[in-house]
Image (cartoon, rainbow, N blue to C red):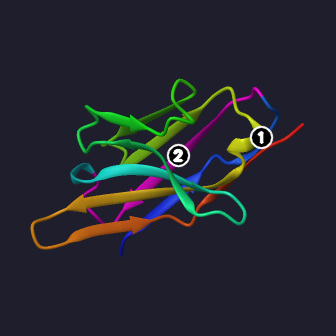
Amino acid sequence: QVHLVESGGGLVQPGGSLRLSCAGSGFTFSSYTMNWFLQAPGKERDFVASITSGGTSTTYADSVKGRFTISRDNAKNTVYLQMTSLIPEDTAVYYCNARRRLVIRVDDYWGQGTQVTVSS
């Protein structure tokens, strides 16, 4: 059974930092592109960052470039999101996503989310 479990969320002051973690199990973690998305109250789920299966390439939403860093440790089946210079607009539930595109289908798994609140 596939599991993605996020951790590391919480309340932080503007300008502060947090590191989110997402541990995967039940699938071949190293074969999947790993992504972070966020969903603010009343809004759609938006892309934050992505890292390829081998960790050689990353992509970021414009709103987080220069502030957030995605990384992964395939030996630990874990992906991270280091968030710095946090602003109130970063407040959202952050979701981990594992995605693998095959010829005949796309395998797509989601975690349950972790709340990040940026407030003084």
Q: Is residue 19 magenta?
A: yes
* Residue 15, quarter of picture: top right
Depicted 2 relative to depicted 65: above or below: below
Q: Which residue is drawn at 72% across and 43% down?
A: 89
- Pinpoint residue 43: horizontal percent, then vertical percent: 65, 63
Regarding mark 2 in the picture, which secondary structure is present there?
Answer: strand
Magenta range is 15-29
Judging depth in this view, the residue of 75 and 35 nearest the camera is 35
Give the quarter of the figure containing the C terminus: top right
Q: Which residue is drawn at 71% across and 66% down?
A: 42
Residue type highlighted by circle 2: Ser
104 with respect to 1 (left or right): left
* Residue carrying label 1: 88
- Pinpoint residue 49: horizontal percent, then vertical percent: 45, 42
Q: Which of marks 2 and 1 is in front?
A: 1
104 with respect to 107 (left or right): left
- Pinpoint residue 90: horizontal percent, then vertical percent: 68, 43
Q: Does the magenta stretch include residue 99?
A: no
* Residue 103, quarter of picture: bottom left
* Residue carrying label 2: 21
Regarding mark 1 in the picture, which secondary structure is present there?
Answer: helix
Depicted 90 relative to depicted 94: above or below: above
25 with respect to 89 (left or right): left
Residue type highlighted by circle 1: Pro
